[in-house]
Amino acid sequence: MQRRQFIHALAAVSASSPLLLASSSARAQSSTASVPLDSARWSPRNAARLQLLLDQHGRHSPAYRADRKPYAVFDWDNTCIMNDCEEALLMYQINHLQYKLTPEEFHQVVWRDVPDETFMADYKTVDGKPVRMADIAADVVADYRWLYANYQGLAGSRSLEDVQASDQFKDFRAKLYFMYDAICDSFPLEIGYKWIIYFYKNMSTAELQAMAMASNKAALGDGLRKVRYQSPETLPGKAGVVADTHFHGIRVHEEIRGLMHTLRANGIDVYVSTASIDDVVRVFAGHADFGYGVPAENVIGLRLDMADGKYTDRYLPGWHFNWGPGKTVGIRQQLQAKKGYGPVLVAGDSDGDAWMLRDFADTSVGLIVNRMKKGEIGADSQLAAQQLGQPQARFILQGRDEATGLMLPDEKSLKYGKTERKLLA
């Protein structure tokens, strides 16, 4: 009886042995294969290039060392997302008058590090007259004094909706946003990028991040649309009537979000290098609601000095300006100096990212979200175009549709308001 049971059991095992062997083989194969990238809307050539990077540098590569984990560095605005979360926050802060500044402090912030000069020729009044910093600053400060005295969220008693209907508010919004663009384009970019974050003065990190969260959710729910804001003719002030355009709306780039998760699944760490203040980007990059999963300590960006737990209107002494060549400085100081090697993958979209895309010998792939720009990033984009389809391409271009915020399965992109996809500027 026992012998018959043993023979029947042996027969059962023999009959099933091909399945067992196949299952064992599958397990062995899966244990040595990299976690695959979801091709999603990646250009097929880019999907293949990124998969090769995962195969060559991920945890299942023969050369992989757990004590020397590879890492990737991503720009944030217009790379990980469609549009710019800090510029969206600027407009959100204006629209909701979320300031913790007295009129005197506001005046000081408006003038922080900005030269009293005439803006470049592109920034004129609607009737073609030049605009000087002193004139438009005086108008904006006067508007803020009125808003401060009237809005119930500051020192007044009137509702936000009531105040938003005033000409003073409309003048404030149009001229302050105009100032930001004019300062960035007329003077060294460092002045404008720091200037925008000085308006967080007197906020705690929790207060700033709560405002950033509200701004992110509002922008994700908004349409992708360009809106022209013109100051009222009833309040020409010293500067005159000006107008500027803001690109509303933000979208998650699912392909980038997915790539970040796939990199980590393959044993490659993920960092963000941004020219926005890092505490704002940490909300989008790290909060579970948005799905990117980047730890706060893995975000390198601009930083303000703090006093008594509140931001000041002073840039953090000794901290580099994290844009352009400064992003390379940040990676070298914060990552390469500690790890002993550079990033295996770098992703960006603009001149602010061009240097970090090309400066590290360890970088296998420089991924460029294709905005068809000239300048330094244009030079990198030209190299990507020359390497199109090469299995080991050093630079790759990834297209997107700016009307939807979606990636395109193409290296070419579709600019907002256009109908033809293009590869280069």
Image (cartoon, grey):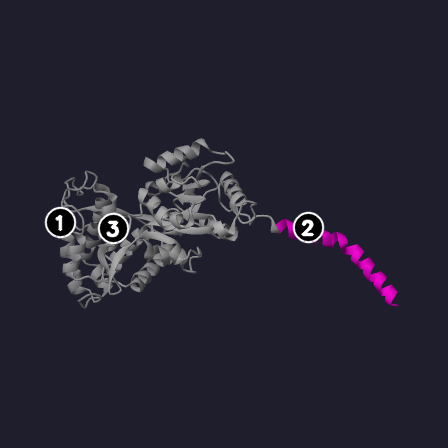
The N terminus is located in which quarter? bottom right
Is residue 329 visible in the rendered image? The answer is yes
Q: Quadrant of residue 307?
A: bottom left
The C terminus is located in which quarter? top left
Which is nearer the N-term, disc 1 or disc 2?
2
Span shown in magenta: 1-30
Amino acid on which the number 3 mark rests in the picture:
Lys
Q: Quadrant of residue 291?
A: bottom left
**Which residue does the numbered mark 3 point to in the structure image?**
194
Is residue 324 visible in the rendered image? The answer is no
| Residue drawn at the location 25% of the way across and 44% of the way down | 189
Amino acid on which the number 1 mark rests in the picture:
Pro
Mark 3 vs mark 1, CA separation in Å: 28 Å
Is 305 drawn above or below residue 225 in the view shown? below
Residue 11: in magenta span: yes
Task: Depth check: give the residue in front, 107 or 233.
Answer: 107
Query: Which mark's residue is nearer the viewer, 1 or 2?
Result: 2
Residue 41: in magenta span: no
> Mark 1, residues whose alpha carbon is within 10 Å: few (<14), some, or many (≥20)?
some
SS label for mark 1: loop
Which is nearer the N-term, disc 3 or disc 1?
3
Q: Residue furthest left?
A: 238
Is 51 drawn above or below residue 12 in the view shown? above
Mark carried by residue 25: 2
